[in-house]
Amino acid sequence: MADSSEEEQPGQDIINEILNKRMNRRKAISTMGKVGAAAVLAGVVGAAGGYIVGGSGAGGNTGTTTVTASGAGAIPKGSGTFKMGTSITTSGPTAPIIAKASDMFNAIVSLVNARGGIYAEKLGGYVPIKVITYPDDGSAASIKSNYTKLVTSDNIDFALGPVGTTGALAATSVTIPNGVPYIDCIAGEVPIFSQQNAGKWVVGAINVVNFWLWNYLNVLKTTDAKTVAILDHGEDFTQDISGNGAVALGGKQFAESLGFSVLTADHVNPTFSPNYDYTSEIQKLKSLNPDAVLYCDFAAIFSASMLRQMKTAGYKPKAYHAIQGSVGGFTSSVGDLKNGVSAEVYWDPSYPYQGFFGVDLWNKVRTQAGFTDLDFPWLSIDYMGLEIACAAVQYAGTTDKTAVANALSSLQITALQGPWKAQNPVTLPFPPPSGVSIGVGQSPVIPSPIQWQNGNRVLIGPPNIATGKYIYPEPLNI
């Protein structure tokens, strides 16, 4: 905290109004960004063309004011602590992508509490936050055991979801019947949101992954491309993205609705082998000659391997879109071959959104926890899940579980990755077609397409946040 000063500081009028009980909770929420906590603003969510977009001026604080902790006009301190909990996978195939999660949560807690915590009017003022974490081995049994401890022993107020749908369903099998609000983070699949009673207790930091390719296909539509080939691994996650999954909603359906001909939709590398031989698929693609090849890869090493094998085989498609091609695992594997490749991101430094805590806090979190978004891109979603949880407490004015769950159903903020709300029903980027059920509670947030241009990651859509234009045919170095 800064030293006390006789001169009234910027934002002091707001603090005084809170202290004098002349400001209601919703007004306090809209102005807290001026007094040290990020503002909760009604995020404007809209559409431009076919894209899902959010206005760059949709909200979030742009600065903070430090005030004295004691004496006249002090920030009021409330009673209690906002306790959140999660399970972090430390072994198995998904462990590497969240290896810095514990460090990130520790950094968030440290930095937010150093600012005074979060404001909860009914608790009397600002309260500290706490995140309790337990390691798991990636199995449903291990994750369920952890959430059982979090709910029944630690008595958490709010549950942050684990990585993957298997883990999410295990977690919510505990949180839903025990009435604990839950935010899904790194999963985003339909069964999480369509299970019984999920509509009351479960929301998503992001939308379901079925919408992953929507923004890129709208960018591709601006070119003269007419045909596409779509690849996945044949399991739930990548099939949901490709449109080959149990729910007929994904890349294949979007491509057809936008006027593209889908020449093939194949399963490749079903065993997730880093040494998989893509020769037969590459020869098939050579013969079909699609205008764009879209690879819904489970991990960057697979699309990187296919790109190298394309070079060896002398096959250079007009576009190679690898959904995980934006991350360090891809770039470190292919080097300069990345040039021209398109991919997706959930967050980029060029994003105009400040988020609930202010983007400066996110920058400090990454520095303090020792990771980059390039190497750990999924952690921005966990971060966003936590900021949404804190916003819900500030909106509700309490950590009471039912009140927080109710707040989540009506809360609208501009989070780190853009305008957020729990959709019920889902209308963005568009309502599901008749006969297709995807549940409720998902946010509008879906990935944005990027392209590697001259060694730089350039945001090519949606148009309201793009930092450059898509180069097509892609200038691939193969």
Image (spheres, rainbow, N blue to C red):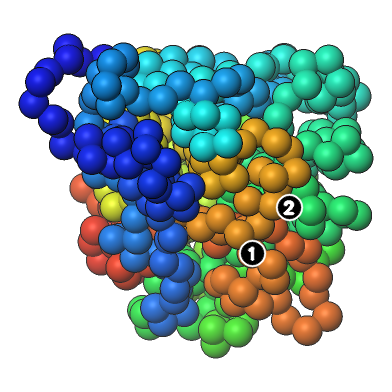
Where residue 297 appears, x then y in whole percent? 61, 47
Q: Which residue is mark 2?
A: 189
- In the depicted view, which residue is nearer to us: 164 or 223? 164
Quadrant for residue 451, please give it: bottom left
* In front: label 2 or label 1: 1
Image quadrant in which the N terminus is located: top left
Identify the residue at horizontal 47%, vertical 29% (top origin). 125
Dot 2: few (<14), some (14–19), or many (≥20) neighbours within 10 Å? many
265 to 433, vertically: above or below:
above
User: Viewer-proximal residue, 256 or 462?
Assistant: 462
Which mark, residue 423?
1
SS label for mark 1: loop
| x 91%, y 54%: residue | 196
- Please name the residue shown 57% across and 21% down the image: 79
From the viewer's perspective, tell me whether residue 430 is left or right of residue 425: left
N-terminal of the pair, mark 2 or mark 1, is: 2
Q: For residue 333, what is the image quadrant?
A: top left
